[in-house]
Image: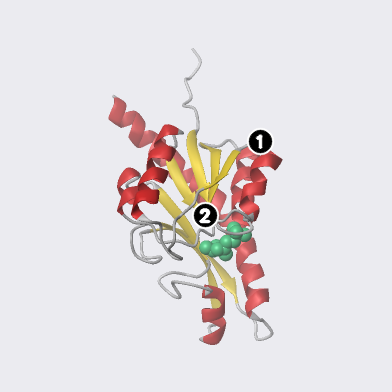
Amino acid sequence: MTQQTSPPLRLAILGSGKGSNARALIEAAQQIECHYEPALLISDREDAGILRLGEEFGIAACFFDPGPFKTKFLQEREERLAAFLHTAKIDFIALAGFMRVLHAPLLAAYPQRIINIHPSLLPHFPGLAAWKQAIDAGASESGCTVHLVDDGVDTGGILGQRRVPIFQTDSAETLHARIQEAEHELYPGVVNAFAATLLQKMTLHQQ
Ligand code: GRF
């Protein structure tokens, strides 16, 4: 008798920038036996590089107008985004360089199902330009952290971390480049493990 395997969970990736972490997630899903399928790419910026990955990899991609605020969604827009993600049958969400704080509409629609990657060893250096914060503080190491998203700034439960050394010769840019290499190694594995755990919970819930 052959064993029934569950189809991969549908992942939406939200980003505001060039999308190198989104690329790492997509490429890993093509190579490893994967519990997630990148099904939708969304950006709050029309010109974001992450949207171009849609065409390259044949994944649905769209700009989602966030409204007038710089660091959050207009509430009504966030409600609309949550409804859109449900309609697209998205199971969970990975933020990859997404520059807005999420609030109730999305957090309630996807409780404990939104994860983020941050370029420091949290709880150190939350917030913007964490690699520059580490250099300015004279730290000898930094790294990256994958964590659950809550309504704070980089405060949710930690799912995985990777350490990166800081050299005396480092600038903010060279450190960020080294951290990004670590991010691309860390994020796909943590997302895959998260999807596997979520799949188990969903299967138990259905029984
Ligand atoms: C990454 O360094 C990530 O940790 C931070 O924003 C950056 C996004 O880079 N949240 P990219 O768009 O994935 O290349």
Q: Nearer the viewer, residue 181 or 93?
A: 93
Image coordinates for residue 48, horizontal then vertical, percent: 62, 55
Q: Which residue is identified by label 1? A: 58
Q: Is residue 51 left or right of residue 88?
A: right
Q: Are marks 2 and 1 in contact (CB under 8 Å)?
A: no
Q: Is residue 165 left or right of residue 160?
A: right
Image coordinates for residue 35, horizontal then vertical, percent: 51, 36
Helix, strand or loop at label 1? It is loop
Mark sitting on residue 44 = 2
Residue drawn at the location 48% of the way across and 36% of the way down: 10
| Residue depth check, mark 2 versus mark 1: number of the one nearer the observer | 2
Q: Is residue 151 above or below residue 94?
A: below
Q: Nearer the viewer, residue 191 or 84?
A: 84
Residue drawn at the location 32% of the way across and 47% of the way down: 111
Whether residue 140 is visible here, answered yes or no, is no
Q: Is residue 175 above or below residue 13?
A: below
